[in-house]
Amino acid sequence: MKVLKLLLLFAMGASLSLAGCDDDYLYPVEYPVYDPDGGSDNGGCDEIPVPEKVNNKVVAHRGGSAEAGTAKYPDNSIASLSYAISLGCYASECDIYWTADNNVVVAHAANGCYVNNLKPWEHTLDELRAAGKLSNGELLPTLEEFIDVALHAGTTRLWLDVKRIEVGGATSNTAESVKACSRACEIIREKKAQHFCEFIVSGNAAIWAGCYSAAQLAGIKVGWMSYSAPSAYKSYLDPWANLDYSNFFAGGAEVSNPKYPLQSYLDAGVALSVYNADTDPEMTYVLKYYPKLKAVCTNYPAKLLGRIGSEGL
């Protein structure tokens, strides 16, 4: 059945560009930039590199900006990504949006899904950048730039959060969310970074369906952020649930009789990651399951890594 589903995905078709590498990027400060002709495993764009193994399952939410300090390390910045890499994290989470000129920007939109007071899907990259810089002086980063840094480091993956666009509290512009994922898939393939990128996708059914198809066709792992029954996940290839820990632990205590217990996903063979475990009680709870989890996302990656080390996990 799963093979049939994959064949059906291919039958749907996909526009996946295999264009050459591009290293023409601008940074306001010095950060390592991946050189596609610099003799690495990806030299000449002929091979697909694999991240070096790390000894943890920690994902730095928005690069760990809250822990590092938002003034110098604003969320979704090259600086915060570099912070997560410096800690040796398994992955660094970031948010992506599609732009009107078919770019993908890394940003956490606010106040009705605005980036620099503009709706990213209605404006070009240049317009978004002209509207303001990050607090540390960086230009609004693109996905290509994030991938360059990750490939240069060779260890930390990128968790690309495909954002649900909200207008008036309701989901809207689902096509633009799917376009963010589809275009990201093209960029990832162009960069030969399939092993360095993983998607986490909104629980919205329309966004999930479009992103799941695009990611499967591109050979990129994709997790669904829907608190649905484990059986619902099992209907997909390589099932992965990325869920808010508060479904299982809230108010400083384990949730009694949750609709779908944490263990039920593990028992069903569904890969499970949780977010965002920030306080000591939250970390204590998720660390009980840590060996069986795919990953744990947190705003305080150094703190969580310290807990993992001290507890010998």
Image (spheres, helix red, strand yellow):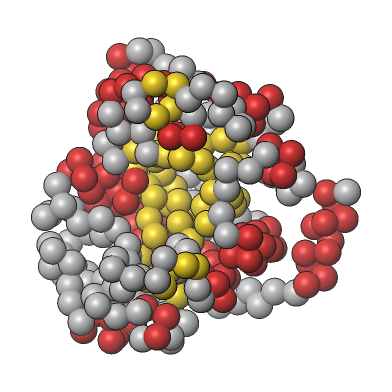
* Residue 10 in which image quadrant: bottom right
| Depth order, front residue of 215/234 | 234
Picture coordinates of residue 84, whole percent (x, y): 30, 44
The residue at the point 36 percent across, 86 percent down is 123
Above or below, 104 relative to 151: below
Left or right: 148 in relation to 31: right
Quadrant in the picture for residue 175:
bottom right
Residue beneath the point at 45% across and 62% down = 163
Q: In the image, residue 189 lies at what x, y percent?
A: 57, 66
- Residue 189 horizontal side relative to residue 93, left or right: right
Where is the C terminus found, in terms of image quarters?
top left
The answer to whether 250 is drawn above or below residue 15 in the figure is above
- What residue is drawn where x is 32% and y is 62%? 108
Q: Is residue 97 left or right of residue 46?
A: left
- Does the image show residue 194? no
Name the residue nearer the viewer: 90 or 289. Answer: 289
Q: Residue at x 11, y 55 (%)?
A: 71
99 up-or-down from 275: above or below = below
- Can residue 6 be seen here? yes
Left or right, residue 209 beside residue 62: right
Q: Using the rendered view, name the quadrant where residue 143 is placed.
A: bottom left
In front here: 34 or 92?
A: 92
User: Where's residue 229, x and y in %?
Assistant: 67, 39
